[in-house]
Image (cartoon, rainbow, N blue to C red):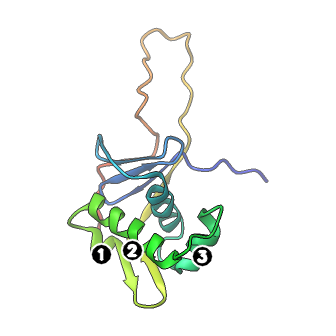
Amino acid sequence: MLTTPPRSLSFDQFTLDVLRCVLRRGASKVPLRRQSFEILRYLAEHAGKLVSSDELIEALWSAKPADHNASVGQCIKEIRRAIGDDARWLVKTVSGRGYVFMAEVSACPPRTTLRRSDPKVKPNPDWHPGCDPFRRRTS
């Protein structure tokens, strides 16, 4: 059975646009290097599970860096800086073992296509059905 990967992942007040490799807070883009984005995406896809630095290196790096703990640590630092005040509860460090993404993550389905034959319907490029980027954490 083929499944289509989600176009976006939403958590707290953020949306990860997986196809464009963009992190958004509401409608604003949050700057993030590509490798840091990939780590955030991987952690969000494995929300609630302990992910070690070794697992991140194995999954996301094409060549193992000289100091993989420092490389992953730098990306985590950048992710936390980009996220801001909520960073510590969103990406929890488990000392000596790895990281746990604590937020509830919602996968946004791919965009639906609108028929061009209806002139009144104008597609909004940022709209994703079933996805509310302004949704707050409820617990």
Front-lying residue, 136 or 44: 44
| Contact? badges 1 and 3 (CB < 8 Å) | no
Q: Position of residue 54 (x, y in %)?
A: 58, 79
In the structure shown, which secondary structural element does the residue marked by tag 2 occupy? loop
- What amino acid is found at the position of numbered circle 1 in the picture? Trp
- What amino acid is found at the position of numbered circle 3 in the picture? Glu
Cα separation, mark 3 vs mark 2, equals 18 Å
Front-lying residue, 96 or 124: 96
Q: Which mark is residue 102?
A: 2
Q: Position of residue 48 (x, y in %)?
A: 47, 77
Q: Which mark is residue 89?
A: 1
**With respect to residue 80, does 133 lie above or below?**
above
Q: Position of residue 9 (x, y in %)?
A: 47, 54
First-in-chain label (1 vs 3)? 3
Q: Is residue 139 visible?
A: no
Front-lying residue, 128 or 117: 128
| Contact? badges 1 and 2 (CB < 8 Å) | yes
